[in-house]
Image (cartoon, helix red, strand yellow):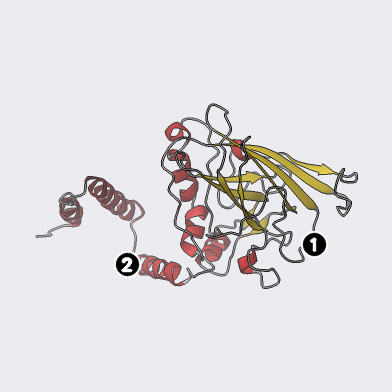
Amino acid sequence: MIERQQDVTVAATSVMERTSDPRLREIMVSLVKHLHGFVRDVRLTEAEFREAAAIVGELGKLSTDTHNEVILIAGSLGVSSLVCLLNNGDQGNTETAQSLLGPFWRLHSPHVENGGSIVRSATPGPALFVNGRVVDRAGDPVTGAEVDVWHASPVGLYENQDPEQADMNLRGKFTTDTDGCFSFRSVMMIGYPIPTDGVVGRLLKAQDRHPYRPAHLHALIFKPGFKVLISQIYDPADPHIDSDVQFGVTKALIGNFVRHDEAHPTDRDVGSPWYSLDHVYKMEAGDAVLPRPPIK
């Protein structure tokens, strides 16, 4: 029987400790202890609790086939980045090429031959030529890996957000060759604001925070025998490189996007300026398990 507020935590923790699955038991016991501790720490009022419950419900309602507000707020609170860094790079002790999945990865990107273009509709902007190489921890090439890439357009929108873009524009899947290499042509991306018409937007406004992510290129690399590598490569010249709203920029993810003001050496249709990116992706041994797509 509950006689005082402290008894609630004792009773709830006792119930959680009877969970049969060991890992679920560990998580639920810790969750109850920390949630109850948080309520006491801030002395949460009844009105604030009702508002918080309404916000949780709203997060679910705002998550659709093309938008995931839950993932968006997890990133905006730094949770996504923390989980990523804790689980990679020798359990958070060393640098890692792993990064946030983000809310815009889609399954079934169309396959493109190495050297091909992922531009599928009129997308004005400077050309970008990417040369990537996938290696293991020893630096040896990972051949036959599937490399799924995607990025925002030069107007700062992914194709699922923009009716002016063709389906799967600026998305493509490549296969590494015997040297672990892949390559493609696209257009140079820019930084962009995350969606602010929901819960996350209200949070940023209340905290006087800007909504911008620095320009970046996503990649998800799959090969049996390796942990799936989810990575983002950032442009250090972006004005928001040190204040990413999603806390995703790490030193290991800074790329070398080189601007060229001269004519392209082989493609006469490429005007200046154009950009190039050469980058090495390092995979770690592990189980190749694809994440659940945040959108369809």
- The crowding category of the residue bearing disc 1, from other C-alpha atoms within 10 Å (few below 14, some 14 to 19, many at least 20), is few
Q: Position of residue 21 (x, y in %)?
A: 21, 49
Is 269 left, or right, of 156 in this rendering?
A: right
At label 1, which amino acid type do we have? Pro
Q: Position of residue 78 (x, y in %)?
A: 49, 49
Q: Position of residue 138 (x, y in %)?
A: 54, 26
Residue wearing tag 2 = 46
Residue wearing tag 1 = 124
Is 12 left, or right, of 293 in this rendering?
A: left
Q: Residue at x 56, y 64 (%)?
A: 201
Q: Residue at x 9, y 60 (%)?
A: 1
Q: Position of residue 146 (x, y in %)?
A: 56, 47
Res 151 label: none
Mark found first going from the N terminus, 1 or 2: 2
On screen, residue 35 above or below 140: below
- The crowding category of the residue bearing disc 2, from other C-alpha atoms within 10 Å (few below 14, some 14 to 19, many at least 20), is few
Count of numbered marks = 2
At label 2, which amino acid type do we have? Glu
